[in-house]
Amino acid sequence: MKKALVCGAGGFIGGHLVNRLKSEGYWVRGVDIKHNEYKNGNADEFIIGDLTDPLVCKQVLEGGFDEVYQLAADMGGAGYIFTGENDAAVMHNSVLCNVNMLHESQKAGVKKIFYSSSACMYPEYNQNEPENPKCSEESAYPAAPDSEYGWEKLFSERLYLTYQRNLGIQVKIARFHNIFGPQGTWKGGREKAPAAICRKVIEAEDGGSIQIWGDGKQTRSFLFIDECIEGVRRLMESDFSGPVNIGSEEMISINDFARMIIGISGKNVSINNIPGPQGVRGRNSDNALIQEKLGWAPSLPLKDGIAKTYNWIAQQAAKEVELV
Ligand code: NAD
């Protein structure tokens, strides 16, 4: 039986990844500084531990692992990443998780390690036009991410690649583009646009309005969680290291995205664009490389994934109302 260690298993993507690995017959240990908020993830063992501490990284690797998935990071949506207020924590905590987990994994004889980078590492100068962003993998340099979060991701990508070149551990690097789905954070300040907009629409009165940060013309693409996990597993099983985009090519403006969610709700809700943190003007995945290297690319329509997510958040919100 193969053994996998999932770092960040208390988080959104980590919880789903644990379930997928279990369904494939892996023995799985999860580690995180917190339990999964929505009790998602059926790991055989779950350890609460802080991966900024090298001793903890060494301990969680005890027993030996075939594969390590390093998803632990200090992160959140635009309200967390782009205000600048959390930059020191983002840089310090995430870089230490990566330095320590990679170093200890290599020392422990792990064969393969996965690292979750982000589309936030792409240069800002290629994402100034909402209609025409460029996010092909080779466009990463000259580097100019628009956030410290993006700079940390870019540094860590390079760190992983040095360990592969100099020390022989196989690395697999994916650049995720806006992953969303059920069991993701939907309130509290760290939620990202899809969950935040769903929540706002759910909370809005019929005939009322929701606030959207920016002029709403900024564009993004969003990838449903199941396709993200599929991409991770395919990358891990391939002979390609990446970095490679794991994202959707279905680009949409934020206001159109909000209209899509309002349509799913069946409510009569209008959009009120207000100033707020919003990141780059345009971003879209470029899937030419993943298609070429893995013979696969995400294809689920955005509307299908967001309908499932809307229904899940509506259920969560209803439970909270019952509790009050
Ligand atoms: P998440 O915040 O839900 O999960 C990250 C987990 O890491 C959290 O549970 C957190 O508690 C844990 N963590 C943070 N510091 C830790 C520490 N010191 N020790 C142990 N655990 C620690 O985020 P997610 O959406 O599941 O993202 C997973 C990974 O994918 C992250 O590396 C993130 O940067 C990357 N990513 C996500 C997206 C997205 O849209 N969700 C996009 C690009 C990249």
Image: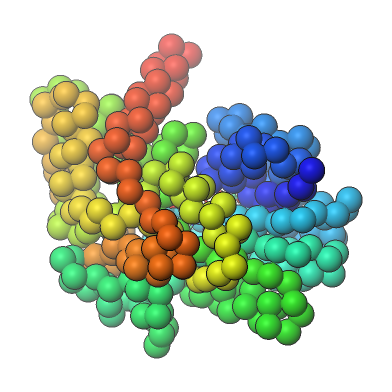
**Residue 84, visible in the rendered structure:** no
Side (left or right) of 288 relative to 7 = left
**Residue sticking out furthest to the top:** 322
Q: Residue at x 62, y 78 (%)?
A: 161
Q: Position of residue 135 (x, y in %)?
A: 33, 71
Q: Position of residue 104 (x, y in %)?
A: 80, 66
**Residue 5, visible in the rendered structure:** yes
Comparing 139 with 194, the one in front is 139
Side (left or right) of 197 relative to 87 = left
Comparing 148 with 163, the one in front is 163
**Residue sticking out furthest to the bottom:** 142
Q: Residue at x 43, y 60 (%)?
A: 295
Q: Is residue 165 above or below residue 208?
A: below
Q: Quadrant of residue 51?
A: bottom right
Q: Quadrant of residue 19?
A: top right
Side (left or right) of 213 relative to 174 = left
Q: Position of residue 34 (x, y in %)?
A: 67, 41
Q: Residue at x 22, y 73 (%)?
A: 128
Comparing 136 with 55, the one in front is 136
Side (left or right) of 173 relative to 24 = left
Q: Where, quadrant-wise, is the N terminus in this rendering?
A: top right
Q: Quadrant of residue 302?
A: top left
How many marks can you see? 0
Q: Where, quadrant-wise, is the C terminus in this rendering?
A: top left
Q: Is residue 182 above or below residue 93?
A: above
Q: Residue at x 85, y 54 (%)?
A: 64
**Residue sticking out furthest to the front:** 295
Q: Position of residue 66 (x, y in %)?
A: 77, 56
